Image (spheres, rainbow, N blue to C red):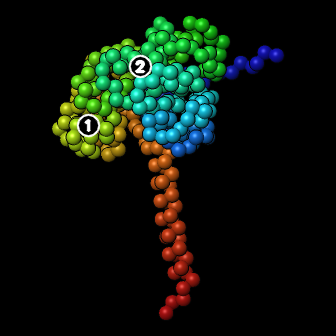
Amino acid sequence: MTPPARSPAPANPFKRRLLAGEACTIFGVRSIRHPGIVALAQASGQDAIYLDFQHSPIDMEAAAGIFQAGLLGGVSVLARLSHLEPALIGRLIDSGAHGLLVADLRSAAHARELVQAALTAPRGDRSLGLPIDPRFPGLTGPALMQAINDATLLVAMVESPEGIAAAEAIAAVEGIDALMVGSSDLSAALGVPGQFDHPRMLEAYQALAAACRAARKPFIAGGLRQPADLARCLALGAARCYFTGSDTHFALEGARAARARAEEADSQATRLVTPSP
């Protein structure tokens, strides 16, 4: 029996919005290892999530289930890596990752290594594992390889003085879609931890923004929460891409709020049952 025709989900909703200059949101996943995190992202109106292989114990089996849920549910699911690891990169994308955030790239050579590891021929040399992907029904061979390449988002994270110095060369590498500053790590590397308005940080933001303008690629200001910090980067042309937190942050925030509500309810209930003197 021929399976019924179905409209494929968008190839990469987050990449489309980012490259179009539209506002988009994304949060990190560190603790929840169940595909239901995709439903939470949908219900809260988020455009994407990233599985944090840099700062969490998440494993490949859990990640693959979440990637597949994202492919079926139309939510972009990325992976953040602490370093270049070609074998892991290939497994992540074969498992359904919409793209990668790779920390602390410091040179154009690093950027080219990422492209080679993440994309298939002719843009890279990753082995194609012939994944089951609902986004590309009926595609095989070169057409499938091209479709997966086009749908894969590659973000080079710049978090060091060396990376800032090489920003223009990194941004110019074909296959890199965007540059992202890791504000917290960069500020620490520059000797001004958490001081996002420090002249050294402002100079770094300006250098990254200029490199991205020259390459006509988005500049993502990561690690910022305060409107004033965000506004400074938006004025430089930063993408309207907002990192809203992480599942662990949301759980802690919710638990604290629930505890505060319980304390208030206890206070009010105690007053109601305590007779007036």
Q: Secondary structure at mark 2?
A: helix
To which quarter of the image does residue 109 belong? top left
Work out whether residue 25 can be spotted: no
Give the class, few, some or many, for how many residues have Cα within 10 Å of label 2's Cα (few <14, many ≥20): many
Residue at figure coordinates x 61%, y 40% from the top left = 34
Q: Which residue is farthest right? A: 1
Which amino acid, mark 1? Ala
* Distance of label 1 from label 2 (alpha carbons): 23 Å
Residue at figure coordinates x 82%, y 16% from the top left = 1
Can you identify the residue that label 2 sits on? 114
Can you identify the residue that label 1 sits on? 189
Q: Secondary structure at mark 1?
A: helix
Task: Tell me where residue 238 appears, x and y as whole percent.
Answer: 31, 30
Give the class, few, some or many, for how many residues have Cα within 10 Å of label 1's Cα (few <14, many ≥20): few
Residue at figure coordinates x 27%, y 40% from the top left = 188
Task: Tell me where residue 196 appears, x and y as whole percent.
Answer: 25, 41
Q: From this view, report whether residue 127 is shown above or below residue 66.
A: above
To which quarter of the image does residue 145 belong? top right
Task: Tell me where residue 68 appears, x and y as whole percent.
Answer: 61, 29
To which quarter of the image does residue 205 belong? top left
Which amino acid, mark 2? Leu
Mark 1 touching mark 2, by CB under 8 A?
A: no
Work out whether residue 222 can be spotted: yes
Is 100 left, or right, of 105 in this rendering?
right
Q: Earlier in the sequence, mark 1 or mark 2?
A: 2
Between 150 and 94, the one lying in front of the other is 94
Q: From this view, report whether residue 152 is shown above or below residue 40.
A: above
Residue at figure coordinates x 44%, y 39% from the top left = 55
